[in-house]
Image (spheres, coloured by chain):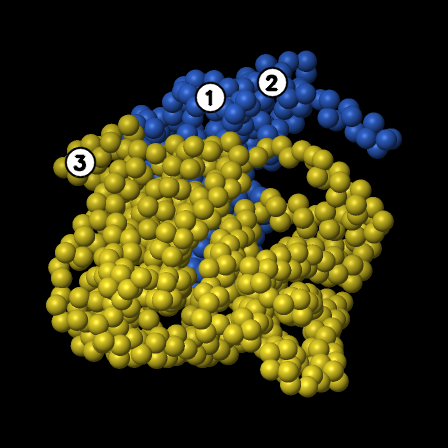
Amino acid sequence: MIKLTNLTKRYGGFTAVNGINLEVPKGELFGFLGPNGAGKTTTLRIIAGILKATSGSVEIGGVDITTNPIAAKSKLGFIPDRPFIYEKLTGAEFLRFVAGLYEQEGPQIEHRARELLALFDLEEWRDELVESYSHGMRQKLIISSAFVHRPEVIVVDEPMVGLDPKAARILKDLFREYTHRGHTIMMSTHTLEVAQTLCDRIAIIQGGVIRACGTMDELRASAASGATGLEDIFLRLTGENAARALVDVLDA
Amino acid sequence: MPDRAADGERRTARGAAALPDPSTRHLLVPKWLTARARTASGERGNALRLTFLALFGLLFWAFIFFMLYRLLRFFRGVQEIGPLLAGKLLGLILVGFFSILLLSNIITALSSFFLARDLDLLVSAPVDWLTLYFAKLLETLAHSSWMVVLMAIPMFTAYGVVFSGGPLFPLVVAATFLPFLVVPAVIGSALTLLLVNIFPARRTRDILSVIAVLAAGGIVVLFRLIRPERLARPEGFRSLVDFITVLKGPTSPMLPSEWVQHAVMSWVRGRPELLPFYLLWSTAAAAMVLGALLHRWLYATGFSKAQESGERWVRSGTMGQLGRAALQPFGVVRRELVLKEVRLFFRDTTQWSQLILLAVLVLVYVFNIKFLPLRGEGMTFFLVNVVPFLNLVLAGFVLASIAARFIFPGVSLEGRTLWLLRSSPMSMRELLWSKFWVGTLPLLILAVAIVGVTDYLLQVSAFMMAVSVLSITFMTLAIAGLAIGFGTFFPQFETENAAQIPTSFGGLVFMMSSVALIGLVVTLEARPVYTYLAAEAYGTPSDFAGMVIGFGLAAVLCAVATLVPIEAALRRMER
């Protein structure tokens, strides 16, 4: 459903993404982990068609996003890490607008928007301007907007930031249920517990290169030396220096 | 080419299962809903603000209309050359409009096509390139043209009334002005598109620097080529025939402004010409086609570059070290506050774009002062010295506009980071005064430079030079104090676009207060200046006591306007 082939992105002399090859099949919830500045957001923004790759290709549902952007994007829902919502639109107007971008309208969309808002406890706020929403409420609205047009693939950057425990739980269930119905989700997150319990497979990226990719069992095997939890595996694969340096910092 | 492939794909798909194809109208729906929500919102003071704006707008329209009405009535009364002069004046104003529109469109296009925050949403959605182009072009056109349209309404009304344009005149004007607005919007957007593709690495600063140099040079050259001051001095021509020849000749035959002028003037003279309409509409259509093709060719690459090419590293160079050393005596808190203000200013591109517009306006102002016909017959010592005194009013107004852009938003821009300053062991007094000085010093240098240079160009007497420089210094301090004061009383903490802060209700109140202050200072100084000039020109007795009182009161007024708003702002911040 998502296929990255030799994907490379350079910013001047700096290589943010370095020849990534990745395939996320239909019905899979794929986790994309890595330290800050590892190249996660750049990769996701290239998949969403916002950034152009320096080389390599991205296919969404078998459609190349560079050569057939409209067809590829029509299969996609994107939730950015720093979501923008028009401040002077109401929640309902915003969802209607996003659905319209995918040329979807009418009672079915209205019903779906209402259902999504109700799911995230935003029903009472549907006719309030977004400017009066809290950070978490905005996050819920932007997540709803990615689902409102029923995309085949959802690409999401840091979905849990700002969500209360109930909304986080709902989102996890929603993601799970959505992939069970044959859709694909690729998600970057720093919440390792979420990735561990939710994702079918996980890739760990560092310095623009995939360090490891597979199921939890496969990751354990590649990290070796007794690492069991995702946190241990993550730190082992991405370097433990930072944790060790902690004492030095406190002593400085 | 990706977009060509997308076209083919869409064509194929339309036959089968259609791909989404949202309309330009749909992309503009949020803008419309936003405007509607703003108008309808029950924000505190919204009704008052609208009333103020409406009143201010009506006064502004009435002022422009009556000034032009009187002038055009006078022109109409002059046989042979009257209508020619009116046409020439219209042409000159339209050339000014065209250059402002071009510059404004270049800067606005950078924001609407490349930096706007809704672009992530729109670019990641299945929106056709042409739809996105039209939506963003319309957005650019609306944002950069509304002020010119507002100024054009009373202007064309005056022409229509004086020259009896008839009931169809508004339609004629609309039919000419619409393509006149489209052409610079397309050219400006295309230039920005090219610049974004040429300067990928150090994006905005480089682009804006190039725009600044091009715009300043272009506008000065344009005005110098036209030489508007020639028309005010007919005695400079060898004969009336020469003068009429210049009036009849086109000012700038290749510019759409000339075509609008021809279309409008031929209509009011009762001999409507179709060629200007054809030229305007065909040029606008051709420009749109070419602009769309360029967009199709370069936009995807340019947009990607605009996302990726922010400056990653900022080195603290010699200037930073010099600043640090120079501010050492003021203590760590003040030094760091001032350095923070300076850094944020120079790294905030929205501030830069505003600065460029103002710099170009100042340059045009100074250059045109240089060519004012203040020498020769009929120009008395009295008149030559009164002009620089009135120059104070204009310079003060320019400074108030600059303060509205750069000092007034100071406290608002702290917005979401105010918690950091409030939770630190630093007094609000330090914060406000550092903001005051960081804004005031450059403003003061600019103020003294504008007044000093224009006075030098006008060759005024030493007395007038001293009065001008001292007055503008005091006025600058007062304007900056008012800006800090009103900026604190009417903060816009939620806005993320600094450019919108000066147009808020508080910004309007600040501008009105500044204009009132300038008016009061000039009124207080008018009598002593008049007495002195009369004594110099006609040998009447001078009034030393009157001078001390007039200038002294002006100085006290400025001191009060500097200190009281800052103290009031301080109390407000500490509440």
Q: Is residue A176 above or below residue B56?
A: above
Tell which circle, 1 or 2, labels the residue nearer the N-terminal end: 1
Residue A192, above or below A218: below
Q: Is residue A5 visible?
A: yes
Badge 1 amino acid: Thr
Dot 1 falls on a residue whose secondary structure is: strand
Label 3 Cα crowd, 10 Å radius (few <14 / some 14-19 / many 20+): few
The tint chain B carries is yellow
- The quarter holding residue A181 reads top left
Q: Position of residue A207 (x, y in %)?
A: 58, 22
Q: Which chain is blue?
A: A
Q: Which residue is mark 1?
A: A8
Q: CA distance from mark 3 to mark 1?
A: 31 Å
- The residue depicted at 37 percent of the width and 41 percent of the height is B191
Residue linked to disc 3: B11
How far from the left and from the top, in percent, is residue B552? 74, 78
At x 32% / y 53%, what residue is drawn?
B138
The residue singled out by tag 2 in the image is A220
Which quarter of the figure is the C terminus of chain B placed in? Answer: bottom right
Is B99 situated left or right of B420 in this image?
A: left
How far apart, in angstroms, are the residues tagged by discs 2 and 3?
Answer: 49 Å
The image quadrant of residue B304 is: top left
What is the crowding at mark 2: few (fewer than 14 residues within 10 Å), some, or many (at least 20)? many
Q: Are marks 1 and 2 on the same chain?
A: yes
